[in-house]
Image (cartoon, rainbow, N blue to C red):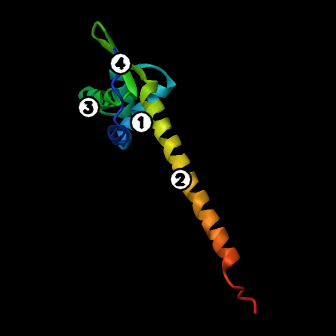
């Protein structure tokens, strides 16, 4: 079964929230239970679950439920999609800036001297 592509707009929406970024920072240290994450973020377990649902939807976090315990960890898919987006846009802007620099360089050579 093919994985669902990551929606870039939702990915940036997920990262725009301070609490979700805090949760991701905690998960970068180690896998944690929802209760541990809620405690670390000073939010309710219900609020943590809502944030985690968005992080899961965007491929930034994954959860696994064993019995009554839901353990969360970082999911690379969202970060890989973010990295691709940044790389593609960096390349695009680099090309545009090179073109602008070339154009300005040519303009400077063709312009009459103001020295004298």
Q: Which residue is mark 2?
A: 93
- Locate residue 96 relative to residue 79 in the image: left or right: right
Q: Nearer the viewer, residue 10 or 51?
A: 10
Say whether residue 25 is visible.
no
User: In the image, which is nearer the foreground, mark 3 or mark 4?
Assistant: 4
Q: CA distance from mark 3 to mark 4?
A: 30 Å
Task: Characterize the local packing of mark 4: few (<14), some (14-19) or many (20 or more) Cα atoms within 10 angstroms.
Answer: few
Answer whether labels 2 and 4 touch (C-beta < 8 Å).
no
- Locate residue 10 relative to residue 106 in the image: left or right: left
Above-or-below relation of 95 to 22: below
The image's mark for residue 47 is 3
Answer whether labels 1 and 2 touch (C-beta < 8 Å).
no
Q: CA distance from mark 4 to mark 1?
A: 30 Å
| Residue 91, horizontal then vertical, whole percent | 55, 47
1 or 3: tag closer to the N-terminus: 1
- Label 2: which secondary element: helix
2 or 4: tag closer to the N-terminus: 4
- Label 1: which secondary element: helix
The residue drawn where x is 67% and y is 77% is 110
Q: Which residue is mark 1?
A: 22
User: In the image, which is nearer the foreground, mark 1 or mark 2?
Assistant: 2
């Amino acid at each position: 079964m093919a994985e669902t592509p990551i929606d870039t707009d939702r990915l940036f929406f997920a990262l725009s929230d301070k609490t979700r970024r805090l949760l991701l920072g905690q998960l970068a240290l180690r896998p944690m239970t929802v209760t541990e994450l809620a405690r670390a973020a000073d939010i309710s377990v219900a609020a943590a679950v809502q944030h985690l649902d968005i992080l899961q939807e965007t491929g930034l976090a994954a959860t696994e439920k064993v019995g009554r315990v839901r353990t969360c960890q970082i999911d690379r898919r969202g970060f890989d999609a973010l990295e691709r987006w940044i790389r593609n846009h960096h390349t695009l802007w680099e090309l545009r800036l090179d073109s602008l620099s070339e154009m300005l360089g040519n303009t400077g050579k063709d312009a009459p001297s103001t020295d004298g």
